[in-house]
Image: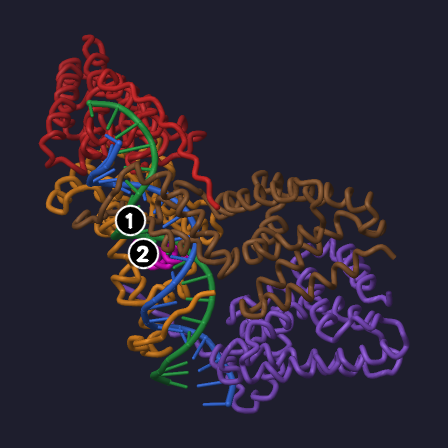
Chain colours: A brown, B purple, C orange, D red, E blue, F green
DNA sequence: CATGAATGAGGGTTCATTCAT
DNA sequence: CATGAATGAACCCTCATTCAT
């Protein structure tokens, strides 16, 4: 029923553009999520990546697929970062601060689409990261026994969200304050 | 061949409806924000208030104007609620939990439009509420001296936001956990 | 989240345009259905009527609502036309031929959305028209007793559809031939 | 930060796939047309055939080209089927009912693109099939002399279309009724 | 001053068609 | 000659905002 007029189409770099496009889309999504949150226009990602709408949909059939791709990378980073035996919850919060904006979108995704089979594994991996750290901290007596993994996860989420809504210029202050707050909350009694 | 039915125009209560409409709009906005957040369709407010779009725009030229009006009422409630000499920060968090959804929209507003001259005063009033409580708690030794008004404000915001994104069925659990977290963070060392 | 820029809006003839728009939409829909069938782009109707998309959706929230409005007029015409005591099935087919293109869309609607509560009554009214005629014709012995209302309805649908897909220039021939076919089928044995 | 996975390209069976692809496309098209009608997404055919889009376009530059190929096979079937000396128009209608959905697409094609030089021959072949049958039936006195090839062709088209728009569950009923109708129309007076 | 329709832009998704490999 | 990704236009629908009455 539609009658597209091929008049004067633009360039078509061919399949070679495929992998590059995929990467560009993920990078663009990371930026867009950071600036506007997970609810930014989906098409904004294509626009920013300099890629056609259709290609966006080919690579990522829906919002969640793209978000999962973005956060998988983040999570891998987090897992690797917390692997060394001397990492602390403090370090985790540190890293979350560094990933600030994207972290928020990550939390949004995990809490909003927890039932989505593609999303659930991310939540589990995140919980694992937290649990491992917490076990260590408990053993060392750095963290009070009243603290559970749930608490740390919630704190992480709150921290990320708080940073996401803060002006870039004030992020450092806010991050410092929030982390002090959580450190106090977690310290042994 | 066509038979357009001119339909009869509806009632127009005239200027007398002015003040009533304003109140109805604020009440409707409170409900709408509570149910759908600050980003609900603006027109949904008019619809719910049973008022024309034009009237909505006359009374509140933009989103922020309406939000300010809503939260002004909330804030008055908070001020009154915290007036008695025996109110604690715990009570404040309590109240915030009770206002959960609307509180979030409030926080959103304050952080998003802090530069808006209509919004700033709300922030100040809120800070006053917190400061007064905090001074008392410090004097009584209920709260550690390391805690500043900024900390309490931040905690309040985080709490509200966290609740806003939580399933209604799990709100109680989340509220309990978050408040325990903040209580621990605030307690004297 | 959207940020429409009011820059240089076009004319807004105000509510006065309402009834006119409604009529224009129905008229436009009649034409569009006649030319492209019931599956024509919905927006084509707004375009042809010279009316904004939004107005189309205000007046007719979905395809079926518009279609029902169009065919209600057609049906009223049919009911009135077949009222006189000397009308025959032949006359009915005649009329259907006259309404040719739109009739097809009508049949499409009735058969596709029979479950839609707005559509079902149209089907019933149509069946009533047919039944009344048939009863008369049976009584007069003009039509064989083997013919049921179902048969006439089906013939009507086939006739309309056949005409709809015929070049305008050949409609007369096709109509003549089809009607002869059905006359033969219906005649007493 | 991103880690594009280049993915491995899939198999490319090379030129040898040519003839096989053509056949697969026709078979796929037959299925797709039967299920979704002539207006199904063109690309659905390639998908179902397990063939690249490009190959589809190479073999069949446009919709009509593919449709012609499909119906050519159908017509061959019809010609063969009606060859025996004792075949009747009733048998023809029978066969059309059996091919129902695809037949409709066929009719659509013939009537929509009658001017297309690739399509016209199909129409002629079909007419030949009908004429041959009709001549026999006339000779045997099974069919009225008032019936011409045009009439049978039209009836065939109407029957196919009617079936195409009928719920699968009701096809049998509709087919029975329609054929009775045409039998009555065709019977000698 | 209230009303509620009109307007049109924006974002979502699908699909026809092209073209590098 | 096959493959399958890229492209972009079209259509769908929702809303923010304006403005005649």
Q: Which residue is mark 1?
A: C103
Rendered position, C48 above or below E17: below
For the residues labelled 2 and 1, say whether their Cβ atoms are less than 8 Å apart.
yes
In the structure shown, which secondary structural element does the residue marked by tag 1 occupy? helix
**Which mark is on residue C54?**
none
Place of residue D41 in the rendered image (x, y in percent of width and height, measured from the top left): 32, 37
Disc 2 sits on a residue from what chain? Answer: C
Residue C66: name its quadrant.
bottom left
How far is disc 2 from disc 1 in space, using C-alphas?
8 Å
Q: Which residue is mark 2?
A: C74
| In-front residue for pair A23/E3 | A23
| In-front residue for pair D7/D27 | D7
Nearer-N-terminus badge (2/1):
2
Rendered position, A30 above or below D149: below
Place of residue A68 in the rendered image (x, y in percent of width and height, measured from the top left): 53, 44
Disc 1 sits on a residue from what chain? Answer: C
Q: Which residues are magenta?
A: C62-87
């Amino acid at each position: 029923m539609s009658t597209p007029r091929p008049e004067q189409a633009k360039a078509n770099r061919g399949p070679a553009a495929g992998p590059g496009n995929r990467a560009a889309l993920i990078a663009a999504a990371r930026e867009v999520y950071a600036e506007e949150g997970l609810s930014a226009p989906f098409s904004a990602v294509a626009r920013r990546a300099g890629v056609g709408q259709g290609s966006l949909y080919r690579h990522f059939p829906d919002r969640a697929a793209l978000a999962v791709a973005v956060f998988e990378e983040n999570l891998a980073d987090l897992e690797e970062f917390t692997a060394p035996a001397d990492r602390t919850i403090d370090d985790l919060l540190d890293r979350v601060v560094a990933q600030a904006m994207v972290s928020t979108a990550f939390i949004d995704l995990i809490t909003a689409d927890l039932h989505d089979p593609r999303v659930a594994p991310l939540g589990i991996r995140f919980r694992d990261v937290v649990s491992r750290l917490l076990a260590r901290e408990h053993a060392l007596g750095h963290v009070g026994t009243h603290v559970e993994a749930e608490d740390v996860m919630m704190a992480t989420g709150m921290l990320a969200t708080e940073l996401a809504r803060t002006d870039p210029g004030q992020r450092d202050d806010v991050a410092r304050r929030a982390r002090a707050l959580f450190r106090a909350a977690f310290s042994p009694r």
